[in-house]
Image (cartoon, rainbow, N blue to C red):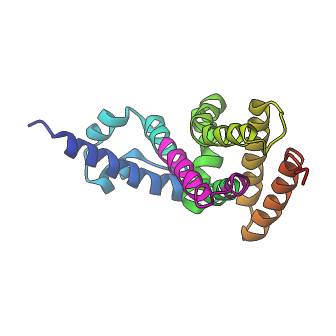
Amino acid sequence: MRRSKSETHGTIQLLLKVARAHFTDKGYANTALEEVADEAKVTRGALYHHFKNKQGLFLAVLELVQTEIADRVEQEATSSEDPWNQLLLGCRAFITAVVEPQNKRIMLIDGPSVVGWEAWREMDEQNSMTHLREQLVLMQEQGILKPVPVDALTHALSGALNECSLWIAQMPETAGGLQETMDVITGMLEGFRMKSLA
């Protein structure tokens, strides 16, 4: 009996949810696909049909996490109508989301080593960096930012955000590190801000 598209979609979403919990709690190395399949109440064959192997399942979970974080950044940034505030709100939202327990191990710790640095960077570029670059281009077009190379600024800022996120993720309490990071990021960005002549 063939399963409907909605049933297949439901199975995939359930497997992703269960796998995400296991990868978060146990890490990639200690997650067993048999346990994920059992908890999701599917056969191992069904799991392998959808994801081929453990790395394929992890990659799908990582893509889900990156997409969620990018959506949160965009949602938070658009809560303001001021482009400068949008940029800072987006930076804060990115760090806040990345260091949350359900994201940091998958995104920061296991992600680069499991899928490889190049693949991880490519996923980052397709999600958070895309929104960041679009915002910087818009701000430059509006005369808010100095005419600096946008691609270089995007990579510099993204690198700073990722590195600070790694630093904050190791702290027992993240609020202080987040505020210190935002103070530094804001100061850095001020150097690229066009000064009003008024």
Of residues 84 and 71, the one nearer the viewer is: 84
Q: Indicate whether 128 appears above or below 190.
A: above
- Is residue 42 on the magenta stretch? no
| Above/below status of 132 relative to 186 | above
Q: Residue at 86% of width from left, 46% of height from top? A: 194
The chief SS type of the magenta part is helix
On the image, the x and y values in percent for residue 167 come to 77, 55
- Residue at image x 27%, y 44%? 9
Q: Quadrant of residue 137?
A: top right
Relative horizontal placement of residue 98, taking residue 38 as reference (left or right)? right
In-front residue for pair 191/164? 191
In the visual, does 125 lie left or right of 152?
left
The image quarter containing residue 131 is top right
**Residue at the outermost front position:** 198
User: Considering the image in quadrants, where does the N terminus appear?
Assistant: top left
User: Residue shown at 20%/46% (left/top)?
Assistant: 7
Q: Looking at this view, name the residue that lies furthest to the left.
A: 1
Where is residue 71 shown, x and y percent of the image?
Answer: 52, 50
What number of labels is visible? 0
Q: Quadrant of the C terminus?
A: bottom right
Q: Is residue 92 left or right of residue 78?
A: right
Point out residue 91 in the picture as x, y percentages from the top left corner: 70, 53
| Residue 138 % position (x, y) | 68, 40
Q: What segment carries the magenta color?
A: 63-89
Along the line of sight, the residue nearer the viewer: 45 or 144: 144
